[in-house]
Image (cartoon, rainbow, N blue to C red):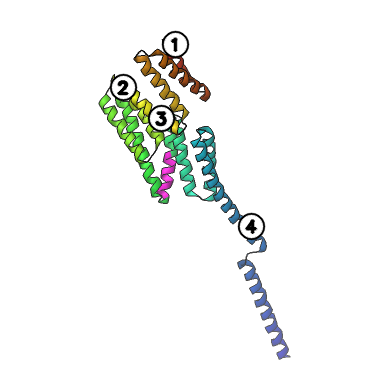
Amino acid sequence: MRAQIIRKLLYLCLLIVAISIGVFNLFLSPSKEQEQSKAVEVKTVQGNQKSVEELLAKGRKLREQGKFEEAREIFESGVTLAEQAGNLEGQVESLFHLGDICWNQGDLTKSEEFYRQAYDLACDSGMEKWVERGNYIFEIFDHYNQGKILRAKQDYPGSVTSFKLAISQAEAINSPDHVIKCLRQLSVTYWGMFDFENFYRLNLQALDLARKINLKREIGQCLNNIGFYFWRINDYTRALSHYFEALEIAQELGNLSQQSACLNNIGTIY
């Protein structure tokens, strides 16, 4: 009798142990559904990573074609998708592109905001290449703004020095976008100094660079300035030619302030 009881107790103990092991394994081992879910997550992340690279490539291509509004939309999507995929490099590059585009469009406040976001991410992630680029860009901003301030105070030599420093920094990172605007602003300082030949030369230089990267906004502004130079030397035929070309670009871009400037300049001749 006692032996039977002992056997039953042993059987119950073994049964409990077996059940416990099964439950334990159930918690430890992922279910088929969990494994499938994890596989889907991995594929989604991998897909997002690929999509980020595709967006960056598309955005770069649009920039090369001078389609900056379309490129901006692509890079904004790139920031969001890169964040979802945990792709910090993609986020940083997209933000730098957005900073460049806003700089080209004349929205320097928004441009600096994008650069700052990119720079902070790059610093936190130890991306030295992008950190260095950010440092150069912030120096360009400082020299550019200082150049305009000094010109407004009629400190023309100081303004020239500031813009030349900005150009030097832009050339150091191979950024024609920044070089172009700084060249054009430097030309305006020379105009204030009645140095019309340097004004003309710098606008030709900026125009050549702007055409290479299809930067129509700057192309139009340089053409308008060159027209102003020809007006100054009484070559009205060439002045009008440049004014009308600049006006056509301003109309294409819907740039009302530039259209007004071109029409006013044309009016002074007629």
Query: Is-magenta flag for residue 120?
Result: yes
**Residue placed under numbered mark 2 in the picture:** 197
Residues drawn in magenta: 115-124
Mark 4: secondary structure: helix
Location of residue 70 (image quadrant): top right
Q: Main secondary structure of the magenta part?
A: helix
Between discs 1 and 2, the one toward the N terminus: 2
236 or 132: which is nearer to us?
A: 236
**Which residue corresponds to the image point at 46% horizontal and 39% vertical from the top-left?**
97
Where is 57 relative to 203, above or below? below
What's the residue type where badge 4 is placed? Ser
Frontmost of labels 1 and 4 is 1
Q: Residues within 10 Å of mark 2 (few under 14, many from 20)?
A: few
What's the residue type where badge 1 is placed? Gly
Which label sits on residue 37?
4
What's the residue type where badge 3 is placed? Asp
Mark 3: secondary structure: helix
**Residue placed under numbered mark 1 in the picture:** 267
